[in-house]
Image (cartoon, grey):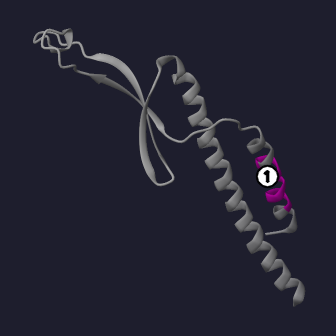
Amino acid sequence: MSICQIQKWKDRISEIRKDLGRIRIMRPGSISEQYNVCGNPNCRCKNKKDPQKHGPYFQLSYTFKGRSTSEFIQPEKVKEVRKQIAAYKKFKSLTAEWVELSVYIAKEEKKLSRRIKK
């Protein structure tokens, strides 16, 4: 590797930092659609020939501070929550890349410093 490659990695870290600065509201998790059957024996969801479950209900599931959580999301909020989940995935991806590049830089700078001492 060369000093040129190290500089490219540092430049990429600068881009990552800018991208991270553009991320706003984020949250972990995933959204699933739920369909339910109620307790009313005369309801459409209990029809023997053509049962029609209630729903969809949108459920967000995630782990935060080591605790699994799930909550229902109002249909009109689903699009917004999906954007927040996408922002979180972007955040995780960018920070993982930043760490990876930082490790590469540290290793290469160590190698270069050994060469200079020789």
- Does 35 sit left or right of 31 as displayed? left
Q: Position of residue 25 (x, y in %)?
A: 66, 35
- Does 61 sit left or right of 82 as displayed? left
In the image, the segment drawn in magenta is 7-16
Q: Position of residue 83 (x, y in %)?
A: 60, 30
Residue 3, relative to residue 39: is it above or below? below
Q: Please state which amino acid type lies under the numbered disc 1.
A: Arg
Of the pair 92 and 75, the residue shown nearer to us = 75
Q: Position of residue 65 (x, y in %)?
A: 51, 53
Main secondary structure along the magenta-highlighted residues: helix
The residue located at (85%, 81%) in the rendering is: 113
Residue 13, relative to residue 108: is it above or below? above
Residue that badge 1 annotates: 12
Of the pair 20 and 73, the residue shown nearer to us = 73
Query: Is residue 9 part of the magenta span, yes or no?
Result: yes
- For disc 1, the neighbor class at 10 Å (few under 14, some 14 to 19, many from 20) is some
Corner quadrant of residue 97: bottom right
The residue located at (82%, 85%) in the rendering is: 114
The residue located at (38%, 22%) in the rendering is: 57
